[in-house]
Image (cartoon, rainbow, N blue to C red):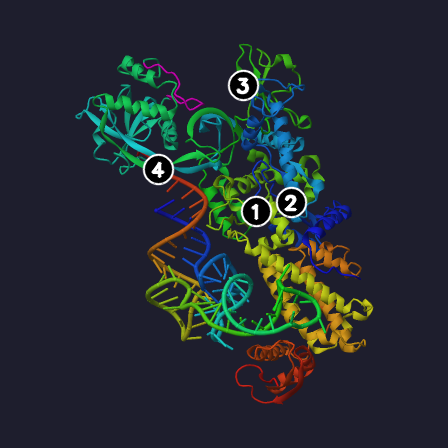
Amino acid sequence: MELPKKYKAGQTEQCWRDHWKETGVYAWDSTRGRDETFVVDTPPPTVSGSLHVGHLFSYAHQDFIVRYQRMQGKNIFFPIGWDDNGLPTERRVQNMYNVKCDAHLHFDPDLEFKRGRKGEPLRISRTNFINLCDEVTREDEEAFRRLWTRLGLSYDWDEEYATINDHCRRISQYSFLELLEKGEVYQAERPVMWDIDFQTAIAQAEVVDKEMRGAFHYLRFGVQDGDRAHVVIATTRPELLPACVAVLAHPDDERYKPLFGKKAITPLFHAPVPIMADPQADPEKGTGIVMVCTFGDQTDVEWWREYKLPLRQIVGWDGCLMPVTFGEPGWESADPDAANAVYGQLAGLSVSKAQKKIVEIAEATDGVLDRPRLDITHAVRVFDKGDRPLELIPTRQWFARIMDKKEALIGQGNKIQWHPAFMRTRYEHWVEGLKEDWCLSRQRFFGVPIPVWYRVDDDGQVRYDERIVPSADELPIDPLDDAPAGFTEDQRDQPGGFSGDPDVLDTWATSSLTPQIATKWILDRERHGKLFPMDIRPQSHEIIRTWAFYTIVKAYLHENEIPWRHVVISGWILDPDRKKMSKSQGNVVTPEPLLDEFGADSVRYWAARARLGVDTAYDEQMFRVGKRLCTKLFNASKFAIGRFAGIDPAQLGPEAITVETDRAVIRELRPLIERATAAFDEFDYAQALSLVEDFFWRTFCDNYLELAKSRTYEEELTEGRLSAAATLRLVHRALVRMMAPYVPYLTEEVWHWCYTDDPGMHESVHRSPWPTLDELAAVPEPAGPQTYEATIVVVEAVRKAKTDANLSMSAPVKSVSVTAKQPVLELLGATIEDIKGMLHIEQAELTEGDPGEGLVAVQTNLS
RNA sequence: GGGCGGUUAGCUCAGUUGGUUAGAGCACCUGCUUUACACGCAGGGGGUCGCAGGUUCGACUCCUGCACCGCCCACCA
């Protein structure tokens, strides 16, 4: 056999990719049982984002675990999907094609689109829009597919899905309908968190804090029938003054006690509002008395509900102030003309402009402002994909009941093993901190339509309480394009007809079903039963509150189950300044050039060095280290295999291992296998790698290969040469397999040089069994436990002597005298010939005696 | 404000249930063309393990407090 001279990663990778594809080495076997199957709930990457090295990192982690499990004989279910629905894609499609989705339009199958079209945005139906999104994401998916394949991720590509395809829509809509049927999903009209740019409701999980500049404005409210003329209220939202419905202070607050039960008069709008006592009012904040508006913040909503205050909504869906008229019912004012004169200047303005305007007006009006404003910086709530602060706007939305299940959901979290374990706490705290039911509906387009129609009564009013739902076998449907059974399209939005729900589901409502999507759930209950609950969910920590949480919710609501037994959490890749890599930060490193330069195996090595849950600073040096390991493995393999290649494998069984040095190194291999296996069983691929790498480099290459080398060059097929050859084969074959999860290309290459036909092994290293102690059981233990250690002590002493004399390792040594106590001396007697051969020692003298400190005392005589 | 992580060599990180002299890789220094590999080999320098207490025969490891860094959550009149 002619082995290649140099290791070239790029050339071999493509060859093995093709080979794996042809042989179906990563395919799931649907006939095998659940207990011998390892099931992964793979995260479907958001395809509209840009690719960066962080992707390689966490996806490699999953693959290490999966490849180990596969070598443990497990039937692997490792699907891959693409998360393509959602806002980022919508935005890109709108810009690319200059289109705008209009939910009132109908699907036009003949519509054609051109990129970069000028002029007014073309209004198109939801179905047309979704098709367009679908088209665009297909290109992105291709980029991911190429990258994942290059990285050597061992997916079963037959299980590929995309969250917007018919299958996912079917599963997602079915989930919604089943929960509706169970009463776990309901519709309600209530104030919800609302993004004024995307003009949609959002859920608590999508809210983030953002530091923004603001100011306290001190407004003088009049007091009816009071001893004092006014109270001063501090507010950061003066533009909401027209929406003020009450004024509150703490019941024990002496400053305001006398005012409770009386009415305050709002400045500028002259609206009488009740002054009430409430323990939630904090005397320390602002001036200790607060105005309740519909709605400034979550507490306003609570007070509004508790005290059944009237609704005075002024902020519309677009974040602009709506027209209202003071003096009309619900808009009391002691001076409607003055109020309307002021409000007339605000109506139509955005909240931020309205704020500026009302402050101007207040400044120009006597007795409104009590003192100059106080500039502050404070955190406000914004949509995680948005920019401007959220508003609370009363709208009709769909919700899933989760508030009544917090305890149960924490219980579900406790049944799951989290890796690292402390990540469970994040989950728990998130569930404990939930404030509202999960808002499921979004006023968006590229998503899974809510599969509901409503009756329209004879007066043309939509009757939201009279729902029409499709049957399971009709799914997926789009209620804006499909008519419900028993109706025809011309009855849409007509008196006596029907109307389709215009909204789509939260993307998480679909993403939370990745297990059910992959198992095919309702479509194939038997298959679902074989795969669910799954074994692991790999993901990153920032989506514990979304993806992990919602998936646990769905599994609980549908089947009262946990979705998976383990959650494994990867850390982030940070840039060298320890900032998270993200497109918006402009600090991303694109992955393809790295794969070109270092090869997939080296990049995987870099990923494998990082433990679960630990953020890692990007360091290109690690790719070089990985590449070095690959080169070393290549060269050592070439050498080791070359030393036994000409010998009939039948002669190289465990019974051939007769020399003490060989038995000693195999004794060292045993704990390595045990410890690496234990680490991998805990998903600690980083620890396993560190153990294997250390053994490979130091014990195998630096020491054992050199010790055995002289015997392997013996001309006759002596017992010593046979023993060395058998040991090289046994140890090397184990090490290649233990490195296979990390460096799949190179190990497959090496495997194919000589191990494919071994009994008990597989054609592919990736289907060959992970090493076990059983493989070594037939090799006897060395005479004593310290053979290897004592031998290395001697070797190191002689090496040091050579180095101190600035000599080459091949320089001859006249003599070495070794002093040790009897049992150790005897062990050394069995390996001394190897030591002599390794270090070119002419004469060695073993003397019984006290070595002083240490196991062995060594005296080296160089010349 | 609450919580969760972290703080070990110049850098990046290991350190198994407390037990000799705290490890690795990178970087640095010295030497070595040695028939697998100079992408290598051999050797070396470099750390009072964030700070202060405590428990213990013994603490990087356990407890308490503090400081700093990161993250999560909350507040945000």
The location of residue A602, given as percent across then percent down, is 62, 54
Q: Which residue is mark 2?
A: A148
Q: Earlier in the sequence, mark 3 or mark 1?
A: 1
- The Cα–Cα distance between marks 2 and 4, rounded to whole angstroms, is 42 Å
Mark 4 packing: few (<14 Cα in 10 Å), some, or many (20+)? few
- The Cα–Cα distance between marks 1 and 4, rounded to whole angstroms, is 34 Å
Q: Can residue A657 be seen at all in this image of the molecule?
A: no
Amino acid type for the residue under numbered disc 1: Val
**Label at residue A378:** 4
Q: Which residue is mark 1?
A: A53
Q: Earlier in the sequence, mark 2 or mark 1?
A: 1
Name the image quarter holding residue A527.
Answer: top right
User: Given contact means CB atoms under 8 Å apart, are the residues at marks 3 and 2 in contact?
Assistant: no
The location of residue B43, given as percent across then percent down, is 54, 74
Write the start and end of the magenta stretch as one range: A311-326
Amino acid type for the residue under numbered disc 4: His
Q: Quadrant of the C terminus of chain A?
A: bottom right
A761 magenta-colored? no
Amino acid type for the residue under numbered disc 2: Trp
Mark 3 packing: few (<14 Cα in 10 Å), some, or many (20+)? few
Label 4 marks a residue whose chain is: A
Q: Residue furthest left?
A: A227
Q: Is residue A643 above or below residue A104?
A: below
**Element at label 3:** loop
